[in-house]
Each structure stands twice: as structure tokens, then as C-alpha cells.
Image (tube, helix red, strand yellow):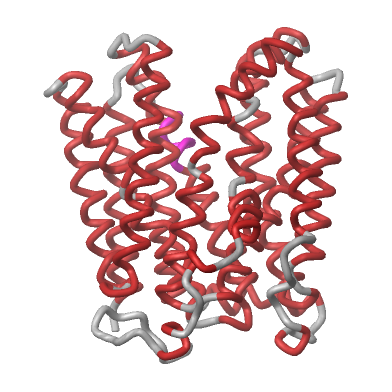
């Protein structure tokens, strides 16, 4: 393992200080990287309002329709490992372009499907393509920046891409209402095609001399070596535990707010949007403070804040203290900590392995989405008709994030 550490006490290295500020990059580079990084949200949030109509048209119950999301998450998680392995060998743009083509094919397949099983299968194809943009856009950031500058850039991109979860359901609902649920997938075909064209307006970020020369099989085998690096596992585990709590929040709040606390559906949308705005705000704050404070200072403090908020939410969920607001406010604080945790944990994991940036990015992403699948699965396993299981899962995952952050940031 490299001896380089990202400690708050260390000064910003000359190479980092000399790196261009994210604000000085061409707008089309920022826009394209934001779009690529947002493909996970774009692929799902836009079609959420169309799911009931899709199930009705294809004679599928809610459980079968929900598998279109589960299948996407599984494909998205595993696909990152493949793209990460080949990108360090062949560069960034060509694998991203191939991924976008797969995304377009998968989206068109969904639009043309005549059964829910076919849509599930095409969603896996769609996910395999979408994840290329997400994992390799992070590697492209690492190609351009180091350490705190990379975290700063990731925060900027995440703040921009946070618009997708807010606008996605609104846009998708309007498309479905006007043109039907299949039109939503055709809209995703158009988004993929537009992003593919935009991709070739930005430069290749991994020069030929920096690419690895080993075989693809050896490249895949590097994941075993990376799994042996304690600090990578610590940073990846931080993100994975936090994602597990976040997905428990996503899966649990519709029931907790709408069914248990009788919040109207349209008001729930506003409460959910508040969390997105919280993420945007903390990402922008992180962008301003991370260079001066350092990742190893911010990350443990942020996970500690998330754990405190999760414990308050769990206490409210168990006792009913504060009613809806006693549950909503600490959950809002937990979600908002994403702006200090996700970008920093990714940037820190990438910092010591610039020559394997896409492999590390893929591994961190796969572990993170695996945590998300586990979080939603735990919520389903322990559901008892109250918000308590959600609060308990989020609190437990918050504790795991703190433990991983502390282990990862030790000297």
C-alpha cells in the first residue's frame, strides 16, 4: 500500500494545488460528466411514475414490477467491475461509448417489450450500460484531479446531478400521462443518444502511456489485490454502510410517511425533495471546505453526525416522540450528510491508486450499491407495520459507516 495519506494536518501537495479548479473547467465537460454520473438516477427515477400503468398493461402485480428495479441494481453493481477492469487498459471514452450504446439498446428493448419478464431482462442490459458512465466518470475525475481537488470536483458533479431525482419523476409522469409508459423508455433512448454525442466533445483523460498493458483476465484479477488493501475497504465500507441506510430510507419512507403518518402523496414528494436539496447544500459546502480541512478530518465527523441523526430517528420511530416531524427532521439530517460522505470516501479510495483509478472506482461503486441492496433487503425482512425497522436499520448502518471511516482514516 502506498504511504500517501490524506490527513487534515498535511498541506495540500504542489501537484494538487496546481490542479485546475473545477470552476475553471469547460462547462460542457462538467455537464457531460454530471450526466454520466447521473445515469443511475436517470435510469430509474424517470420511469417510477409509469410503473403502475406498465404493470397494468402487462398484467403484472406490484412485486413483479418492483423486480425491474432490483434487476437494474444487481446489473448496475456487478457491471461496474467489468468496466473498471477494461478502462485502465483501453482508456475512458471508448468503454463509456460502448456502455451508452448498451444503455440505448436496453432502453429500446424495454420500450418494445410485451411482458414484464422481458423488461426485467432489458433493464439488466440497460444497467450494464448505464454503470459504465457512472464508474468511469469518477475515474475521469481522478485522471484530472488529486486528493481534495478530486473530492471538490465530485461534490460539484453530485450537486448538479442531484437535480435528476427531483425532476425525474415529474418529467416521467408528464411523459407517461401524455404519451404512455413506453414513451418514457423512448425518452431514455434519446437521453442516451444525446449523451453519446456529448461524450466526443470532451478529451480522453487517460493518456496511452498511463494505460496498463496486462491482459483483461489479469485486470479482473486485480480486484482480489485491491480487496486486500485495508484502507480501500475502509473507504468503500464507509460509503456502502451509508448507502445501506440511504436505501432503507428510500424504501421505508413512503410507508412511514404516507401510510403510518398519513401524509398526502403530493406532500411526500416535497419531503423527499427536501432531502435532495439537503444533499445539494452539503455537497456545495464540502466543495468549499474539503481542501482546507482534509478528507480525513471531514469524513469521520460527517459519519458521526449521520449516526447521531440516525439514532434520533430510530428513537422517534420506536417511541413515536415528535410524530412525523420527530422522524422527518433527523432523517433529513442523515440524508444530507451524503454531501460530506460519498464524494470524500470515493476520492480518498482513489487517491493512492491513480494507475488503477477505474478499477478502484468500480470496486467502490459495486460495494456501495451492494450496500444499498442489503439495506433495502433488511428493511423488507424486518418490516412490522411501524417505522421502527427503518429507524433501526439506518442506525445500525450509520454505526457501521462510523467504524469504517475511523479505520480508514487512521494514520
Question: x, y percentage for residue 179?
Answer: 76, 13
Q: Quadrant of residue 353?
A: bottom right
Question: Magenta stretch: residue 377 in it?
Answer: yes
Residue occupying image coordinates x 32% and y 41%:
394
389 with respect to 364 (left or right):
left
Residue occupying image coordinates x 84% and y 49%:
101
Please tell me whether residue 197 is drawn above or below residue 246 in the rendered image. Answer: below
Residue occupying image coordinates x 58% and y 30%:
168
368 with respect to 214 (left or right):
left
Look at the image and give the residue range highlighted in magenta: 375-380
Q: Quadrant of the C terminus?
A: bottom left
Question: x, y percentage for residue 37?
Answer: 60, 52
Please tell me whether residue 327 is drawn above or below residue 341 in the rendered image. Answer: above
409 with respect to 254 (left or right):
left
Q: Quadrant of residue 32?
A: bottom right
Given residues 407 and 299, the one toward you in this image is: 299
Given residues 57 and 396, the one toward you in this image is: 57
Chief secondary structure of the magenta portion: helix
Question: x, y percentage for residue 238?
Answer: 38, 60
Please tell me whether residue 379 is drawn above or below residue 212 in the rendered image. Answer: above
Amino acid at each position: 500500500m502506498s504511504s500517501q495519506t490524506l490527513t487534515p494536518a498535511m498541506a495540500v501537495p504542489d501537484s494538487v494545488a496546481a490542479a485546475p479548479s473545477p470552476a475553471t473547467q469547460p462547462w460542457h465537460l462538467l455537464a457531460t460528466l454530471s450526466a454520466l454520473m447521473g445515469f443511475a438516477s436517470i435510469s430509474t427515477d424517470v420511469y417510477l411514475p409509469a410503473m403502475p400503468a406498465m404493470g397494468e398493461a402487462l398484467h403484472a402485480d406490484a412485486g413483479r414490477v418492483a423486480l425491474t428495479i432490483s434487476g437494474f441494481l444487481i446489473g448496475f453493481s456487478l457491471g461496474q467491475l467489468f468496466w473498471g477492469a477494461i478502462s485502465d487498459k483501453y482508456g475512458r471514452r471508448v468503454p463509456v461509448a460502448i456502455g451508452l450504446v448498451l444503455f440505448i439498446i436496453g432502453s429500446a428493448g424495454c420500450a418494445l417489450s410485451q411482458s414484464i419478464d422481458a423488461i426485467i431482462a432489458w433493464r439488466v442490459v440497460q444497467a450494464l450500460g448505464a454503470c459504465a458512465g457512472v464508474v468511469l466518470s469518477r475515474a475521469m475525475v481522478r485522471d484530472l484531479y488529486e486528493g481534495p481537488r478530486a473530492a471538490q470536483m465530485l461534490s460539484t458533479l453530485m450537486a448538479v446531478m442531484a437535480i435528476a431525482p427531483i425532476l425525474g419523476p415529474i418529467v416521467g409522469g408528464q411523459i407517461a400521462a401524455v404519451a404512455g409508459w413506453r414513451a418514457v423508455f423512448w425518452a431514455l433512448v434519446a437521453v442516451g443518444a444525446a449523451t453519446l454525442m456529448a461524450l466526443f466533445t470532451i478529451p480522453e483523460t487517460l493518456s496511452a502511456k498511463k494505460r496498463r498493458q496486462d491482459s483483461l483476465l489479469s485486470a479482473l484479477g486485480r480486484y482480489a489485490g485491491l480487496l486486500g488493501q485495508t484502507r480501500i475497504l475502509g473507504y468503500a465500507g464507509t460509503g456502502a454502510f451509508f448507502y445501506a441506510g440511504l436505501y432503507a430510507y428510500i424504501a421505508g419512507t413512503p410507508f412511514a410517511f404516507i401510510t403510518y403518518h398519513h401524509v398526502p402523496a403530493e406532500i411526500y414528494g416535497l419531503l423527499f425533495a427536501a432531502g435532495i436539496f439537503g444533499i445539494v447544500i452539503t455537497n456545495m459546502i464540502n466543495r468549499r471546505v474539503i481542501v482546507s480541512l482534509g478528507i480525513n478530518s471531514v469524513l469521520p465527523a460527517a459519519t458521526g453526525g449521520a449516526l447521531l441523526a440516525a439514532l434520533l430517528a430510530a428513537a422517534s420511530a420506536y417511541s413515536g416522540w415528535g410524530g412525523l416531524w420527530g422522524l422527518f427532521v433527523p432523517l433529513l439530517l442523515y440524508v444530507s450528510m451524503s454531501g460530506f460522505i460519498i464524494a470524500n470516501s470515493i476520492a480518498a479510495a482513489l487517491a493512492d491508486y491513480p494507475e488503477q483509478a477505474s478499477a478502484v472506482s468500480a470496486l467502490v461503486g459495486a460495494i456501495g450499491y451492494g450496500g444499498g441492496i442489503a439495506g433495502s433487503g433488511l428493511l423488507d425482512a424486518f418490516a412490522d407495520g411501524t417505522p421502527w425497522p427503518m429507524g433501526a436499520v439506518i442506525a445500525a448502518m450509520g454505526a457501521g459507516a462510523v467504524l469504517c471511516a475511523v479505520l480508514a482514516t487512521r494514520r
